[in-house]
Amino acid sequence: MRKCVTMFIKELQNDSVGDCGAKVNKTINCIRRTYNICFGTDYARHFESVRVQFTETSMCHEGALGLPTSHSLEVLAAHCPESFSTNLNNCLKSFQGTFARDKTDPDLC
């Protein structure tokens, strides 16, 4: 999945004014293929729970890029040290701030 999101960012960097929705759809198809390889015929059940994170609004305007849902963050918080949550929040804020300022910034990848 990571390679698919990286592909999205690189395409956005190369064409920041193009059709972002088309880039999102390409990313979703990449993720679908990845899940199909990993989960085989059972991929659909796993894919749909992840698919909802990849919307045009979240990816093109908010810089969310399929970030963990609030539920998965709660699970992580329950099993990881507090420093993990702090570091994750700082990383997300930094990424989203850079994304909002300049989607072509090479620091995004």
Image (spheres, rainbow, N blue to C red):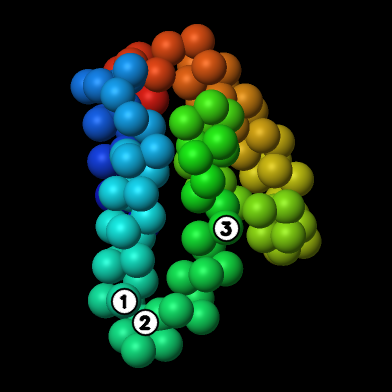
Of the residues shown, which amino acid type is indicated by label 2?
Phe
Nearest to the observer: residue 72 or residue 22: 22
- Amino acid type, mark 3: Val
Q: Nearest the camera: 61 or 21? A: 21
Q: In the shown orientation, is residue 26 left or right of residue 44?
A: left
Q: Tell me the residue that label 1 is attached to.
A: 36
Task: State the separation of the CA atoms marked 3 and 1.
Answer: 17 Å
Position in image of residue 40 (x %, y %): 32, 85
Which corner quadrant holds the C terminus? top left
Check the image and name the residue furthest to the top.
101
Q: Residue at image x 53%, y 62%? A: 50
Which comes sooner in the sequence, label 3 or label 1?
A: 1
Say few, some or many: other residues with alpha carbon within 10 Å of mark 1 (under 14 / 14 to 19 / 20 or more).
some
Q: Is residue 44 visible?
A: yes
Q: CA distance from mark 3 to mark 2?
A: 18 Å
- Left or right relative to 93: residue 70: right
> Tag on residue 39?
2
Q: Residue at x 47, y 31 (%)?
A: 60
Position above or below: 36 against 74? below
Rounded to the nearest angstrom, the CA distance separating label 1 from label 2 is 5 Å
The answer to whether residue 76 shows anywhere in this view is no
Residue type at mark 1?
Answer: Asn
Residue at the spot of label 3:
52
- Of residues 76 and 104, the one drawn nearer to the viewer in this rendering: 104
